[in-house]
Image (cartoon, helix red, strand yellow):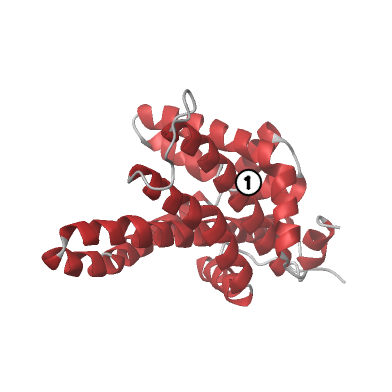
Amino acid sequence: MTYAAPERFDIARVLSRMFGVIARNLPVFAGLALLLSGLPSLTAALVERGVGFPFDYGPWDHSGLGWIVGILVSTLLQGALINATISDLSGRPVTLGDCLGTATRNVLPLIGIGVATTVAVVFGLVLFIVPGVILALALCVSGPAQVVEGHGVFAALSRSSDLTRGHRGAILLLFVMFAIGSAILRSFAEILPLTTAIAAPDAAQAIRDLVVTPLLQALGAMFGAAGVASIYFELRTIKEGVGIEALAKAFE
């Protein structure tokens, strides 16, 4: 049986896949996001308030330890949610153990991809901003390319550049939509702290630090990883005619 590839990058199809994957696997997605994004954010807020850490780490101070742990857990979350998204879109069952196992195997390459992408984008932003935006768009599916295809750091970056070529305008529009949606969600989330601030300013800040920020970070990580994986799925479908069966074999 042959697979007829769609003719163009379809933003509506990408969004439909992203929301569909999350809805079908909400317990796994929410559990991973809260565990690997919300909980570290909450822990950082507690550390900032001097709660739960009665002793000094010496050279491994709170900020340094938090930075290292933050990179590790955010990378694990990225890998786990990418695996979950591609697995679902490929018709495979999504399990917590499989997601974490795939993320663990790919954690070092994903960290390398994150570092290389950050350096490239920051350097591009210094060069009149536009090159940085172009690089960010070109390299945005490096993570899924690594998790699914296992290329290694620089090969995954090159693979992402090839896949996104010719469709970066549509991807930019998706990122703008994500940013607008995040801003709207953050505005609504600020309603409770703002109403509380009138009567109890300290309580309002505590709500913001210990509830609103961790939840927003968990949601952002969840939709961000699922969105990038859905973009990768769309790109492979329209550029290579890769269907569900071919992607499913990558996890066998």
Along the viewing direction, whichever of 5 and 35 lies nearer the viewer = 35
Tell me if 51 is positioned left or right of 31 in this view: left
The picture places residue 130, in percent across and down from the top left corner, at: 38, 37
The picture places residue 220, in percent across and down from the top left corner, at: 45, 58
**Which residue appears at 57% of the width and 46% of the height?**
73
Q: Quadrant of residue 24?
A: bottom right
Q: Residue furthest front?
A: 54
**Which residue appears at 61% of the width and 37% of the height?**
111
The local crowd at label 1, few if under 14, some if 14 to 19, many if 20 or more residues have their Cα within 10 Å, is many
Disc 1, SS: helix
Tell me if 19 is positioned left or right of 127 in this view: right
The picture places residue 47, in percent across and down from the top left corner, at: 39, 44
Vertical placement of residue 107 versus 38, above or below = above
**Which residue appears at 65% of the width and 63% of the height?**
85
The residue that disc 1 covers is 143
Q: Quadrant of the N terminus?
A: bottom right
Along the viewing direction, whichever of 64 and 248 lies nearer the viewer = 64
Q: Residue furthest top?
A: 59
Residue 235 appears anywhere in the view? no
The picture places residue 155, in percent across and down from the top left corner, at: 70, 35
Q: Quadrant of the C terminus?
A: bottom right
Query: Which amino acid type is marked by label 1?
Result: Gly
Residue 2 appears anywhere in the view? yes
